[in-house]
Amino acid sequence: MLKVPEEDYDFPAYDLSLGQVSGDLLFNYPADMLRNNLVNVVKFGRARWRNFQASDLWVSVTFDRKGINGDFGGKLTVDT
């Protein structure tokens, strides 16, 4: 497993800010099975795009011979 250290990212041209971004790269996961895959899990403590605020976000993507599969989740709020 590789750990992605926590960082903050700002993209002013897109009015986008990502905070507390961290993650894990898992090879052959789950470990007790003979699999040839790569699982990326990225977590975002907070994100802001224009008037949209989000927290506790996560994205998981698995790359294997069958294709690319993913899942995501989090909490979203909209400032009016």
Image (cartoon, rainbow, N blue to C red):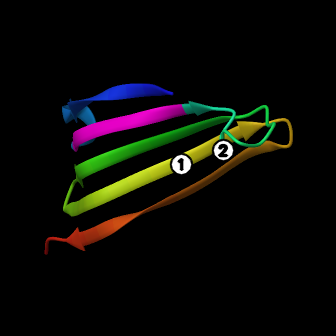
Residue 43 % position (x, y): 36, 46
Picture disc at residue 30 = 2
* Residue depicted at x 36% and y 64%: 74
Q: Name the residue: 24% across, 60% down.
A: 55
Location of residue 59 in the rendering, given as x and y in whole percent from the top left corner? 47, 50
Q: To which quarter of the image does residue 9 belong?
A: top left
**Membership of 21 in magenta stretch:** yes
Q: Secondary structure at mark 2?
A: loop
Return the residue nearer the eye: 49 or 69: 69
- Tell me which residue sits at (34%, 56%) in the image: 57
Closer to the chain start, of discs 1 and 2, is 2
Q: For residue 22, which numbered disc appears in the image?
A: none
Q: Mark 2: which amino acid?
A: Pro
Q: How many marks?
A: 2
What residue appears at the point 25 percent right and 61 percent down from the top-left corner? 54
Query: Is residue 60 magenta-colored?
Result: no
Query: Dot 2: few (<14), some (14–19), or many (≥20) neighbours within 10 Å?
Result: few
In the picture, measured across the screen, residue 3 lies left or right of residue 37, that is left
Residues 50 and 8: in front is: 8
In the rendered image, which residue does mark 1 sit on? 60
Q: Amino acid under label 1?
A: Ser
Look at the image and give the residue range highlighted in magenta.
16-25
* Image location (x, y in percent) of residue 51: 19, 62
Closer to viewer: mark 1 or mark 2 = 2
Q: Secondary structure at mark 1?
A: strand
Which residue in the rendered view is the most extreme toward the bottom? Answer: 80
Helix, strand or loop: magenta stretch: strand
Q: Is residue 58 above or below residue 42?
A: below
